[in-house]
Image (cartoon, rainbow, N blue to C red):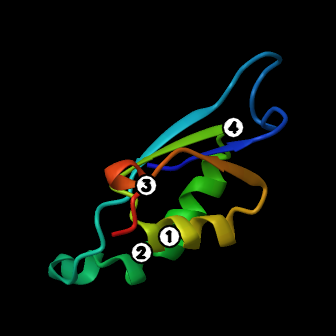
């Protein structure tokens, strides 16, 4: 899973505090019906921005989701490897 990390402290945190968030994105399968990734990806980014974490960990993040988050959360650096140690096969 990807781990976005933003430099500098969050505006909501006290001196020395670090805001950490974990987010299970769920694999984007059509069987999710109304919870299918394309229907909730905007809300996901809004939720992350509202919490304003310094560090964000994700679970079940596949390549397309990671690319979307990278494009929307440009203030973060991304570290880590995707599923299967980042292999894209």
Mark 2 or mark 4, earlier in chain: 2
Find numbered disc 4 in the image and state the secondary structure of the residue it sits on.
loop
Residue 82 image offset from top left, x and y in percent:
43, 54
Crowd band around label 2 with a 10 angstrom C-alpha radius: few (<14), some (14–19), many (20+)? few
Q: Are marks 3 and 2 in contact (CB under 8 Å)?
A: no
Which element is circle 1 on? helix
Disc 2 and disc 4: Cα gap in Å? 22 Å
Q: How far apart, in angstroms, are the residues tagged by discs 4 and 1?
A: 19 Å
Q: Earlier in the sequence, mark 4 or mark 1?
A: 1
* 19 relative position to 76: left or right: left
Q: Residues within 10 Å of mark 4 (few under 14, many from 20)?
A: many
Residue drawn at the location 39% of the way across and 48% of the way down: 85
Dividing the image into 4 quarters, which one contains the C terminus? bottom left
Taking 10 as reference, is 47 left or right? Answer: left
Query: Are discs 1 and 2 less than 8 Å apart at CB?
Result: yes
Q: Position of residue 70 (x, y in %)?
A: 64, 65
Q: Which residue is tagged 3?
A: 86
> Tag on residue 43?
1
N-term mark: 4 or 3: 4
Q: Which mark is residue 40?
A: 2
In what element is the residue under mark 3?
helix
Q: Is residue 54 above or below residue 89?
A: above
Mark 3 or mark 2, earlier in chain: 2
Q: Mark 4 or mark 1, which is nearer to you?
A: 4
- Residue 10 lies left or right of residue 40; in this view the side is right
Foreground tag (3 vs 2): 3
Q: Residue at x 39, y 82 (%)?
A: 39
Q: Quadrant of residue 34?
A: bottom left
At which x and y percent is residue 43?
50, 70
């Amino acid at each position: 899973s990807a781990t976005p990390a933003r430099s500098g402290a969050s505006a909501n945190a006290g001196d020395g505090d670090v805001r950490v968030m974990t987010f299970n994105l769920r694999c984007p399968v059509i069987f999710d019906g109304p919870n299918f990734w394309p229907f909730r990806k905007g809300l996901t980014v809004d939720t992350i921005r509202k919490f304003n974490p310094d560090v964000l960990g994700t679970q079940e993040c596949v390549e397309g989701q990671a690319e979307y988050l990278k494009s929307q959360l440009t203030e973060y650096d991304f570290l880590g490897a995707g599923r299967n140690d980042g292999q894209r096969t």
